[in-house]
């Protein structure tokens, strides 16, 4: 029911030491594409994204609802956007084929980040796919990406399973999660 009404909230955050030119990150999550929401729904989202003009788009899981295999064609409206689009999986992709969802994404300009780190204009986007242990992944990155002074780390995870004090220890500036 809530998916029928696309809502946006603008939050302004300042990162000390980062150049003051603004970076707009659009965070999408829990789209639950399936029997009810397909290509027309994505087109509505893309229309809204064109209004807010983000520099980067992140999708933090549950792009599929788990009942139908998402088709690449359903995602094609995203191809009209000329910005990086990063994606990590959620629990619903596990229900009905993570591999099929990743295959659908690979046919578009959406990048499945998985458990990698992607640098976009001086911001580290740290992906953690659903089935991977979040704390374990952050411990693996300690001493490399996570101690990079002056460069914000944005953590992408489907499950918001760590609080602010826990993630701050790892040098995470912003934690974007779904669920």
Image: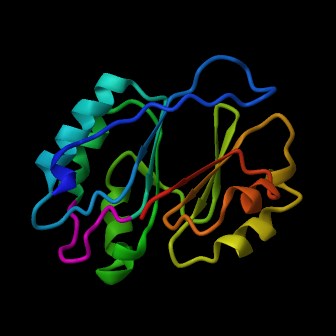
- What is the tally of numbered marks visible in this picture? 0
Please determine whether, in this image, residue 155 is positioned above or below residue 92.
Answer: above
Q: Position of residue 103 (x, y in %)?
A: 34, 66
Left or right, 23 with respect to 105, comes to: right
Residue under the point 33% across and 49% down: 108
Q: Quadrant of residue 132?
A: bottom right
Q: Position of residue 61 (x, y in %)?
A: 41, 62
Residue under the point 79% across and 28% down: 16
Is 69 magenta? The answer is yes
Please determine whether, in this image, residue 39 is positioned above or below residue 11.
Answer: below
**Quarter of the image that includes the N terminus:** bottom left
Pick the residue in front: 100 or 46. Answer: 46
Residue under the point 38% across and 55% down: 29
Q: Position of residue 28 (x, y in %)?
A: 38, 48
**Quarter of the image that includes the C terminus:** bottom left
Rendering colour mode: rainbow
Q: Magenta segment, which residues?
A: 62-71
Q: Position of residue 112 (x, y in %)?
A: 47, 58
Q: Quadrant of residue 18?
A: top right
Please determine whether, in this image, residue 170 is positioned above or below residue 78.
Answer: below
Pick the residue in front: 110 or 35. Answer: 35
* Helix, strand or loop: magenta stretch: loop
Q: Residue furthest top?
A: 21
Left or right, 158 with respect to 122, comes to: left
Is 32 magenta? The answer is no
Residue under the point 29% across and 42% down: 78
Left or right, 125 with respect to 159, comes to: right
Left or right, 137 with respect to 9, comes to: right
């Amino acid at each position: 029911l809530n998916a029928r009404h696309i809502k946006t909230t603008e939050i302004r955050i300042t990162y000390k030491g980062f150049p003051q030119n603004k970076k707009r990150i659009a965070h999408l999550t829990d789209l639950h594409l399936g029997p009810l929401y397909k290509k027309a729904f994505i087109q509505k989202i893309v229309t809204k994204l064109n209004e807010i003009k983000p520099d980067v788009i992140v999708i933090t899981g549950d792009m599929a609802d788990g009942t139908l295999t998402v088709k690449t064609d359903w995602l094609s409206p995203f191809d009209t956007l000329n910005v990086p689009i990063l994606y990590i999986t959620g629990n619903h992709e596990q229900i009905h084929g993570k591999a099929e969802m990743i295959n659908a994404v690979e046919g578009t300009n959406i990048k499945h980040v998985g458990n990698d780190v992607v640098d976009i204009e001086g911001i580290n986007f740290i992906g953690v796919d659903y089935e991977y242990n979040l704390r374990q992944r952050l411990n693996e990155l300690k001493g490399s990406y996570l101690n990079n002074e002056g460069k914000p780390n944005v953590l992408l995870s489907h499950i918001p399973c760590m609080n602010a004090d826990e993630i701050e220890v790892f040098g995470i500036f912003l934690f974007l999660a779904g669920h």
